[in-house]
């Protein structure tokens, strides 16, 4: 397990005592398949399928993450999406030291909604993604109840072609983004800030149906206690698959980013 902890004193405005901020370092490997299938002139099926491992990248399972939705293209610069998410989480190693009985795998239930704004900028494009999620979550301890919380996400991303003037077949491109996660709800008391993820990677467009992307992300995640943080190094490999099931193939499907 790749982990180390460090702490430093932090002022508390409530009682004059010092809270200790504890940061754990860990590494994870995220493998993802993204699909976007055209089923109408402006309507698409959207799917994400992820397998994530942790601790020295591959030592332990972390998540299986399944996201399903339908996307509607309002115009060339705006699309909206909504659907469901069914992630499965493996208990972190620290639960092995607990006396209470716990489940090794727990699932969540979510609804999600998204708006994606596309802003042309020279050879590149800027993507503004606003995503909301309603999450029914539970602890790993046996018989823990599901509790509703809300997550709010904003991502700004860009895809910059390297060897051609635009994103097209045979293009290598630079991919960068930063995403902020905030959560609310009755049970969210000490950690309204949930995560910040920054990513840099390299992508390749094989053809109009398949693209690949690989890169590194830094995640700084606040835990439920409010003083515990995860400093995560994430290696990401992603494949994007696009198909057009409509009889009318024009206008052609534009380049679609991997998120």
Image: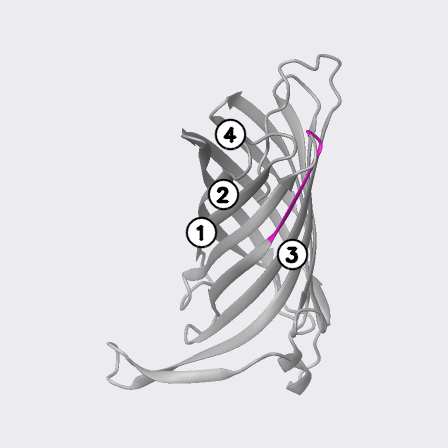
Q: Earlier in the sequence, mark 3 or mark 1?
A: 3
Colour mode of the rendering: one colour
User: Height in image: 18 above or below 67?
Assistant: below
Decide: marks 3, 1 in contact (CB < 8 A)?
Answer: no
Label 2 vs label 4: CA separation? 30 Å
- Tag shown at residue 123: none
| Residue 25 shows in this picture | yes
- Front residue of 132 and 159: 159
Label 2 vs label 3: CA separation? 17 Å
Image quarter of the C terminus: top right
**Residue at the spot 75% in from the left edge and 22% down from the top edge:** 245
Decide: marks 2, 1 in contact (CB < 8 A)?
Answer: no
Point out the stretch of residues depicted in magenta: 208-214
Q: Which residue is mark 1?
A: 178
- Tag shown at residue 108: 3
Q: Earlier in the sequence, mark 4 or mark 1?
A: 4
Q: Position of residue 158 (x, y in %)?
A: 47, 41
Label 3 vs label 4: CA separation? 43 Å
Q: Which residue is mark 2?
A: 131
- Classify residue 140 by image quadrant: bottom right
User: Height in image: 4 above or below 106?
Assistant: below
Label 4 vs label 1: CA separation? 24 Å
Q: Which residue is mark 4?
A: 165
Q: Dot 3, crowdedness within 10 Å: few (<14), some or many (≥20)?
A: some
């Amino acid at each position: 397990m790749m982990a180390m902890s460090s702490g430093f004193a932090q002022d508390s405005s409530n009682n004059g005592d010092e809270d200790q901020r504890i940061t754990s370092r860990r590494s994870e490997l995220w493998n993802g398949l993204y699909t976007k299938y055209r089923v109408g002139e402006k309507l698409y099926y959207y799917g994400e399928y992820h397998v994530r491992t942790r601790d020295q990248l591959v030592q332990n399972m972390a998540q299986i993450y399944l996201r399903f939705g339908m996307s509607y293209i309002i115009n060339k610069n705006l699309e909206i999406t909504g659907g469901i998410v069914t992630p499965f989480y493996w208990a972190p190693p620290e639960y092995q030291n607990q006396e209470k009985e716990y489940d090794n795998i727990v699932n969540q239930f979510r609804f999600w909604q998204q708006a994606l704004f596309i802003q042309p900028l020279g050879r590149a494009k800027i993507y503004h993604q606003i995503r909301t999620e309603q999450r029914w979550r539970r602890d790993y301890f046996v018989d823990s109840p599901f509790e509703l919380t809300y997550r709010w996400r904003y991502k700004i991303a860009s895809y910059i072609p390297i060897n051609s003037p635009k994103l097209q077949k045979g293009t290598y491109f630079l991919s960068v983004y930063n995403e902020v996660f905030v959560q609310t709800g009755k049970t969210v008391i000490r950690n309204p800030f949930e995560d910040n993820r920054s990513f840099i990677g390299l992508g390749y467009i094989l053809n109009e149906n398949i693209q690949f992307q690989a890169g590194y992300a830094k995640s700084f995640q606040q835990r439920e206690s409010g003083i515990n943080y995860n400093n995560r190094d994430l290696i990401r490999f992603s494949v994007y698959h696009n198909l057009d099931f409509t009889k009318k193939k024009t206008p052609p499907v534009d380049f679609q980013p991997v998120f």
